[in-house]
Amino acid sequence: MEFSKEPHRLIVAFGRADAVAGAVILVGVAAGLAVFFGIRSSSASGTNPPPPAADVWAATPVFTIETDGHPSTGPADAPVTIVEFTDYECPFCGQHARQVLPALLAPWGDTLRYVVRNFPNLVLHPRALQAAEAVECAHRQGRFWDYRALLHELPLDLSTGRLASAAVQSAIDTTRFRACVEERATREVVALDLLAAWEAGVFGTPTFFVNGRRFGGERTLDQLNELVRLALASGSQGR
């Protein structure tokens, strides 16, 4: 049997439950390889990758990353789209969310659309999967950004109790939220994120796709601003 790399075709071929299980296995293998070979966020070694020159930008492969229905800010027709694959136990992701992202969004206005998808590291971060599913439950009630911000305030506490208390603080309908979490109603969403990340060569977090071009590792504000400028100069939108 020939297998497609496309996540939605995997769902059709194997069924939803099998796709979820397959995503868990795949990302577990990916995380294990990342640890073994040292392919993790470059900031783990205390260094940031340099911003690319224009010729490097042009040579970087472009991936098609689905954005519809995922948590986002900024207009859908913005000339620049950044997709971040994140892990809620990843300290670099939390630092980015608290310190870098607000400063990145402010000056670009409607020029920039920012989308968040999930890549919980199932080897290093045992609570990241549960947190990702909970965040997607909050997204179903339109409270993604508020809920995510609360989780990033205490990234080392992603216990079930903490996930529930953050829902109360976010003014979420707690009855609906609790049912969503307990039934794991969003696990397919997270599984599809994992499969999409695997297909696009994501090995660690944060990983950014700027108009479809992949840049792994923690990035400074200046580096991300430079990537936005390069995307604008290239004159093509990416999804």
Image: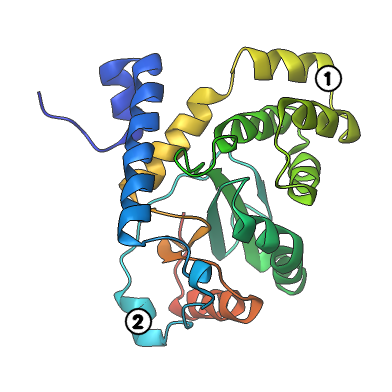
Residue 12 vs residue 101: left or right?
A: left
Q: Residue furthest left?
A: 1
Q: From mark 2 to mark 1, how far is it between C-alphas?
A: 48 Å
Quadrant where the image shows the N terminus: top left
Q: Vertically, is 160 above or below 84? A: above
Q: Vertically, is 8 above or below 204? A: above
**Label 1 CA crowd tier, 10 Å (few <14, some 14–19, many 20+):** some
Residue 63: image quadrant is bottom left
Instruction: Using the image, tell me which numbered label, if any, was put on residue 112.
Output: none
Q: State the residue at coordinates (53%, 24%).
A: 187
Residue 138 vs residue 114: left or right?
A: right
Instruction: Using the image, tell me which numbered label, if any, was put on residue 56.
Output: 2
Residue 78 vs residue 37: left or right?
A: right
Secondary structure category for the residue under label 1: helix
Say what amino acid the circle numbered 1 marks: Thr
Secondary structure category for the residue under label 2: helix
Q: On the image, numbered disc 1 is attached to which residue?
A: 174
